[in-house]
Amino acid sequence: MRKLYAIGIGAGDPEHLTVQAIDRLNRVDVFFVLDKGDEKADLVRLRQEILDRFVTREYRVVLATDPPRDRTPADYRAAVADWHAARAEVYESLILSSLGPSDVGAFLVWGDPALYDSTIALIEAVLARGNVAFEYEVVPGISSISALVAHHRTTMNQIGRAVQLTTGRRLAAGWPSGVDDVFVLLDAHTTFDRYVDEGLHIFWGAYVGTPQEILLSGPLTAALAEEIRRVRAEARERHGWIMDTCLLRRPVRE
């Protein structure tokens, strides 16, 4: 039977790959890569660098165009659902056209497949459609938030305190109750601006784990927020894309 792997490849550094990930890479016949266009060609190149470095058997790479996504929808959830449905069709087409009955395929997933990534849901959607049968396995990877706190030489949590992962869209509605450490992902509008001069500390990073990595941290003052916005905008203009995240911390005195 066909088999698929969803392999977490870390936050950008090829050395983030686990021993398990390298083992699974070397069982794969076909690697599927979604091309997000020239602006994000770096992401395709990184995947190829990983294959060149760690895979010692023959394999094929099959590229497909990632369906476009509406970035300014009137209905956010509906737009995401439509995008996921289009991507599931692409996944199914790739598997049917490029993976033989006994072949092994893989999707190389940035960070960890279980954290703010749609790969697992899309694989399940393809299975639910019932047009192709396969087994699949998920291989965890080092997430962007793990790399972020490691490179800032801090921790995800304060002793005995709660942590929350959220999006900029949800943080805009207010600080979560009972939480002192908040990781903010998918925040194109720098929602941390709303919390300047409220006693928080910010650990921010972009392109974490790559040669382009940028790290900024300190008390979340208006001046630091402005610096992060400026650096972020310049980096996005320079590279054509950006992936960034931050940890907002309310220091707790023991």
Image: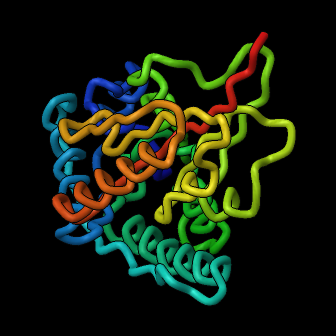
**In this picture, is 171 found above or below 148?**
below
Residue 167 or residue 106, whichever sits in front: 167
Residue lying at the far bottom in this picture: please name it.
74
Would residue 188 be visible to someone looking at this image? Answer: yes
Left or right of 247, for residue 230: left
Left or right of 71, for residue 125: right
Tell me the residue at 57%/19% (across/down): 155
Residue 154: give x, y in percent of width and height. 51, 18
Residue 245: give x, y in percent of width and height. 47, 46
Left or right of 138, for residue 95: left
**In this picture, is 112 found above or below 35?**
above
Tell me the residue at 42%/57% (across/down): 101
Task: Give the tally of numbered discs.
Answer: 0
**In this picture, is 180 found above or below 38?**
above
- Which quadrant of the structure image shows residue 162? top right
- Which quadrant of the structure image shows residue 160? top right
